[in-house]
Amino acid sequence: QVQLVESGGGSVQTGGALRLSCAVSGVTRSNFVMAWFRQVLGKEREGVAGIDTKGQATKYADSVLGRFAISKDNDKNILYLQMTELKPEDSASYYCAAADGPTYFEQWLFPSAYSYWGQGTQVTVSS
């Protein structure tokens, strides 16, 4: 059974940086399309960044483009999200997700494309 465990969340001031990690276990393969989402209580889950099976192609939400970078280490089966220039509006619970099969680029930031989810890690950015 695929399990995803996020880590690296915390509290920072505006302009700060954090790196989130998502460890994938329960499988021997690493060729997942994966993504990071975030959610604020009472709002819909928002796609932040997606990455292809090989870790080469990426897709970002406009709100984080140029500030966040998604990457993956297929040897270790870990997904990362490097976040810089953080803003108070980036505060949310961040979730990693993995798709169970082929996923079109256009779907990468939609929750419906993903079968496996982590429990989330909280990011709080203070002004």
Image: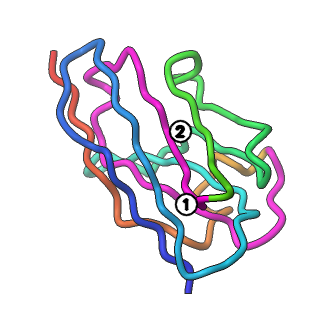
68 over 30 or under it: above or below: above
Q: How is the image coloured?
A: rainbow
78 over 40 or under it: above or below: below
Is 113 contained in the magenta span? no
Task: State the extent of the magenta-drawn residues as a range.
Answer: 76-105
* Residue 32 located left or right of residue 70: right
Residue found 26% across the figure and 39% down from its top: 123
Residue topped by disc 1:
97
Picture mark count: 2
Residue topped by disc 2:
48
Q: Provide residue 103's location: percent of width, then percent of height.
A: 80, 59
C-alpha span from label 2 to label 1: 11 Å
Q: Provide residue 19's location: percent of width, then percent of height.
A: 39, 36
Circle 2 packing at 10 Å, graded few (<14), some (14-19), many (20+), is many
Residue found 81% across the figure and 46% down from its top: 105
User: What kind of residue is marked 2?
Assistant: Val
Per the image, label 2 sits on a secondary structure element best described as: strand
Q: Provide residue 42's location: percent of width, then percent of height.
A: 28, 51
* Residue 108 located left or right of residue 92: right
Q: Which image quadrant for residue 125? A: top left
- Observer-nearest of 53 and 123: 53
* Residue 32 located left or right of residue 116: right
Residue found 51% across the figure and 26% down from its top: 68
Quadrant of the drawing holding the N terminus: bottom right
Asked if the residue at tag 1 contacts the one at tag 2, i.e. Cβ–Cβ closer than 8 Å, the answer is no
Q: Which image quadrant for residue 47? A: top right
Residue found 30% across the figure and 41% down from its top: 92
15 over 123 or under it: above or below: above
Q: Provide residue 117's location: percent of width, then percent of height.
A: 49, 67
Which numbered circle lies on residue 35? none
Circle 1 packing at 10 Å, graded few (<14), some (14-19), many (20+), is many
Is 96 contained in the magenta span? yes
